[in-house]
């Protein structure tokens, strides 16, 4: 599809409305700079009326000379518009609830009073030389005739963009396509955004449907943060646009995992390993039949090549592994075997997997040594294992901290313990530099008071054999 689509990232506004999330000003600046480097076209920096800290962050981001358009999100109130203008943003995004329940319950205003307030705010912002977007909040539950009328009034007053907000996430791809198509036909002189909430898990699908129907700006957040179940995740939308619709959103895909990790640390909201695109299991293959097919042709079980993200597929070896998977892992470890040895090693791995939850490289090498009758440690890739002792702040539940730590890449195990420290973490990395990064990630988890790290020099099994160095 030959169409230009811009991603508007709202991590610093919608994302900070996630329960328990509160970014510092410096964290917001770092996130904004990385978003700009990643290539998002618009950054919703916050709502300056929320607090002095939010206002200061919006102002500082607006003064960073970013390539992305910087936006302040405000109510349809002149005082709010003034705060946005004082921050020096490129665009003021004015929102107002338009659905019957918002008019009656939230504002206690009739249709004409709502329209009048929107016109006054839009005209006021436009008179001060900034671009204006109008968001009819709860647009997907607003009567069509009234939605067209209030959006048309906003456009006539000076708004050059209208954001179609599925505020409670009730749309399906079909209904979203139909609504955006309808508005695209009725509203002339303004571009359309889509802002899709994920209450029913359809935010990405609805966003793509909106694009197909004529919208050219999609609202996203890093890791899908936001109110309740959040909104469409940046990584999912960006890759889906590219892979499914042939649209290049201008994103540096290889930076998405790094951006996701940064926001994980600063938000304290950690992703499931099964998270699409940026999750640790996103390109892992385990079942024997799957692995054999993937090794022959990755497209058999991969929707797209993970290398566009700077990632690579991972072959998991355990009881489900067949000979192809074990052979691939042994090749990775630099161990050569014949067919008979491969069958024995595969059988032993399955036997061990019935007794142990996770099969590590050290286990595979130990089995290989026993089957081959020789030492293969000289070909083991360089690695560093660290034991990190973690002290948790007194007011924080230790279990909550473990849930966050266990999803940090490289963390093999984490244990809640008694004594001076509360958690013991085993971290396996390729080198000291990577270990330091993982330790910093652990220290960055909200609620961690301090850490102490021990480097593993030798590791022994129950028979007193050295199984790793």
Image (tube, grey):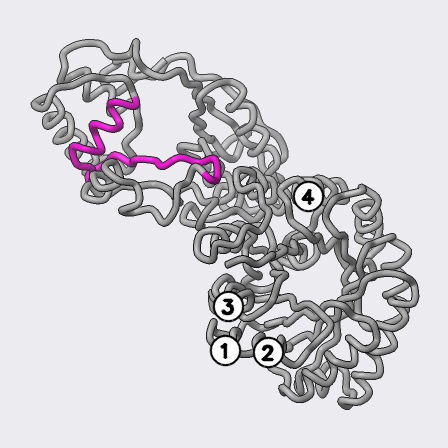
> What residue is shown with label 3?
209
Identify the residue at image location x=58%, y=69%: 214
Q: Of label 4 and label 3, which has the lower sequence position?
A: 4
Q: Which marked residue is nearer to the observer: mark 2 or mark 1?
A: 1
Compute the Cα span from label 4 to label 1. 32 Å
Which is more toward the observer, 384 or 123? 123
**Callout 2–callout 1 Cβ contact below 8 Å:** yes
Query: Percent from the top left, x then y, of residue 323?
Result: 16, 32
Q: Of label 4 and label 2, which has the lower sequence position?
A: 4
Residue 140, labelled with which disc? Answer: 2
Residue 36, labelled with which disc? Answer: 4
Identify the residue at image location x=78%, y=58%: 72
Identify the residue at image location x=30%, y=23%: 332
What range is drawn magenta here?
Answer: 308-332
Near mark 1 (Cα within 10 A), the count class, few <14, some 14-19 or many ≥20, is some
Identify the residue at image location x=80%, y=41%: 64
């Amino acid at each position: 599809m030959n169409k230009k689509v811009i991603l508007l990232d709202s991590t610093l506004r919608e994302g900070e409305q996630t329960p328990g999330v509160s970014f510092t000003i410096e964290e917001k600046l770092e996130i904004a700079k990385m978003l700009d480097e990643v290539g998002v076209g618009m950054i919703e920096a916050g709502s300056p009326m929320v607090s002095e800290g939010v206002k200061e962050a919006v102002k500082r981001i607006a003064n960073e000379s970013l390539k992305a358009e910087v936006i302040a999100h405000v109510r349809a109130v002149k005082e709010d518009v003034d705060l946005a203008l004082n921050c020096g943003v490129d665009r003021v995004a004015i929102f107002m609830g338009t659905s019957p329940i918002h008019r009656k319950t939230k504002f206690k205003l009739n249709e004409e009073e709502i329209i009048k307030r929107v016109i006054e705010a839009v005209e006021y912002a436009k008179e001060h030389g900034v671009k204006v977007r109008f968001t009819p909040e709860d647009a997907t539950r607003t009567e069509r005739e009234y939605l067209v009328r209030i959006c048309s009034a906003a456009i006539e007053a000076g708004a050059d963009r209208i954001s179609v907000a599925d505020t409670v996430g009730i749309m399906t791809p079909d209904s979203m396509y139909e609504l955006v198509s309808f508005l695209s036909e009725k509203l002339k002189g303004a571009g359309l955004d889509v802002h899709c909430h994920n209450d029913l898990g359809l935010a990405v699908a609805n966003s793509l449907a909106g694009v197909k129907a004529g919208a050219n700006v999609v609202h996203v957040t890093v890791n899908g943060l936001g109110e309740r179940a959040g909104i469409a995740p940046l990584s999912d939308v960006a890759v889906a646009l590219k892979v499914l619709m042939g649209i290049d959103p201008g994103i540096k895909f290889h930076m998405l995992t790094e951006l996701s990790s940064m926001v994980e640390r600063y938000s304290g909201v950690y992703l499931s390993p099964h998270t699409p695109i940026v999750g640790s299991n996103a390109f892992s293959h385990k079942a024997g039949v799957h692995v054999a097919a993937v090794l022959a042709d990755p497209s058999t079980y991969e929707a797209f090549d993970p290398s566009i993200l700077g990632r690579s597929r991972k072959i998991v070896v355990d009881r489900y592994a067949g000979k192809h998977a074990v052979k691939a892992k042994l090749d990775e470890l630099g161990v050569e075997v014949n067919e008979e040895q491969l069958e024995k090693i595969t059988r032993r791995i399955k036997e061990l997997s019935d007794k142990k939850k996770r099969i590590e490289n050290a286990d595979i090498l130990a089995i290989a040594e026993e089957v081959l009758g020789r030492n293969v440690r000289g070909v083991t890739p360089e690695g560093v294992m660290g034991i990190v002792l973690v002290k948790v702040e007194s007011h924080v539940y230790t279990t909550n901290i473990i849930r966050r730590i266990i999803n940090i890449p490289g963390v093999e195990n984490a244990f809640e313990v008694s004594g001076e420290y509360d958690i013991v973490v085993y971290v396996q990395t390729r080198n000291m530099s990577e270990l330091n990064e993982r330790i910093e990630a652990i220290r960055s988890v909200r609620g961690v008071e301090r850490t102490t790290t021990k480097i593993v020099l030798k590791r022994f099994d129950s028979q007193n054999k050295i199984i790793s160095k």
